[in-house]
Image (cartoon, rainbow, N blue to C red):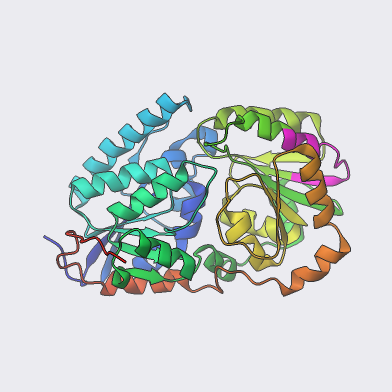
Amino acid sequence: MMNSSMNRKICVVTGSRADYGLLRWVMQGIKDDSELTLQIIATGMHLSATFGLTYNEIEADGFEIDYKVGVLSQDDSPLGIAESISNVLVGCAGAFNDLEPDIVIVLGDRFEIFAAVAAALLARIPVAHLHGGEITIGAFDEAFRHSITKMSHLHFVAAEEYRNRVIQLGEDPKKVFLVGGLGIDNIKKLALLNKTQLEVALGIQLSDKSLMVTFHPVTLNAESPEHEMKELLAALSHLRDTTLIFTMPNADTGGHALIKMIDEFVSQNENAKVFTSLGQLKYLSCISYVDGVVGNSSSGITEVPTFKKGTINVGDRQLGRIQAASVINCEPIEKDIERAIKTLYSLEFKSKLAATENPYGEGGASARVVKALKEASLEGIIKKTFHDL
């Protein structure tokens, strides 16, 4: 029996530091609304010591986690990932059975989110999906994202192009809401650390030059993730006068091998430091003080431009996303990465950064999502018809 908007139960499923960072103010908005009840399921990397047990960050922000669905094995082979998917499917099915939410809300494209949404579909619970319609040609996240769209009933997208794509996938235009990028709300709402506070929090001293590095496994390339990471580290090894701040890669196929390579690089380079999970406050504070970011994280595309900082986007993991003029694309080849770093520090490039506009908007997405979740009619929403163009 679905509730009316009065005391509507909204269950947020979060599987990583990245999606929680984007969902943070949506969750706060639901929690603060007297007519909504917030439920939280934490799964995936949140529960892994390897990735920093980041469910603690959710609780530190004042949220109560209703269910912890542990899933990740130490095996990041295709078989290990498949086992993780099956664990989430079963775990979330049990959680939904107990919590009886009126809407399940998820963000993005990871395998554990795909599994959670499949469980919701089987339980006939409406799903609200955030950041659908985007393209990332280099990873199987792309297929998961579009599959989640087809299993979802309300869609919150970051740009007009993405709205059109969700409709192209057969979704009802009246159920597709253009809200902008969620990450910008964090930048606007959090009181970021000053440079001294940041250095104390990280236990490092930033030199005159500094870069942030986040590189995730590219799951659909012919080249192995280790080969691409080797090229990236080779390019970075020449930057002796630059502080390099690494954040760990995701729990994707091949992720553990990359973690090992980063640890080895940091042990041999005094100017490099690695952090399992910085949390949103330290992560965003870092971006505000480094010269730019290097790697293949979506944050470099969707959030960093708001700081009017440069992004070196390595390889094709993010290929297809709308990009600001502050993004420098390069191949995962040592010489090309070196060229991109040289461009980042060039006077010509730096002189243009002040005019950077983030195509993902100016903030306010979280409040728009909460309003729509509260007001949306759920009557007959489970039976979707394919919207033909």
18 relative to 33, above or below:
above
Q: What residue is drawn where x is 76% and y is 29%?
A: 267
338 relative to 82, above or below:
below
In what quadrant of the picture does the N terminus appear? bottom left
From this viewpoint, is residue 187 visible? yes
Horizontal arrangement in the rendering, residue 346 relative to residue 353 (left or right):
right
Let me know if residue 234 is in the magenta part: yes
Where on the picture, by quarter, is residue 68? top left
85 relative to 31, above or below:
above
The residue sitting at the left extreme is: 1
User: In the image shown, does 349 or 34 lie closer to the viewer?
Assistant: 349
Horizontal arrangement in the rendering, residue 115 relative to residue 266 (left or right):
left
Q: What residue is drawn where x is 58% and y is 31%?
A: 222
Question: x, y (%) of residue 76?
Answer: 48, 28
Horizontal arrangement in the rendering, residue 170 relative to residue 4 (left or right):
right
User: In the image shown, does 24 or 389 lie closer to the viewer?
Assistant: 389
Question: x, y (%) of residue 270?
Answer: 82, 36
Where on the picture, by quarter, is residue 198? bottom right
271 relative to 30, above or below:
above
Let me know if residue 41 is in the magenta part: no
Horizontal arrangement in the rendering, residue 232 relative to residue 135 (left or right):
right
Part of the protein shown in magenta: 231-244
Question: x, y (%) of residue 90?
Answer: 26, 36
From this viewpoint, is residue 158 visible? no
Question: x, y (%) of residue 100?
Answer: 19, 53
Q: What residue is drawn where x is 15% and y is 65%?
A: 380
Where on the picture, by quarter, is residue 262? top right
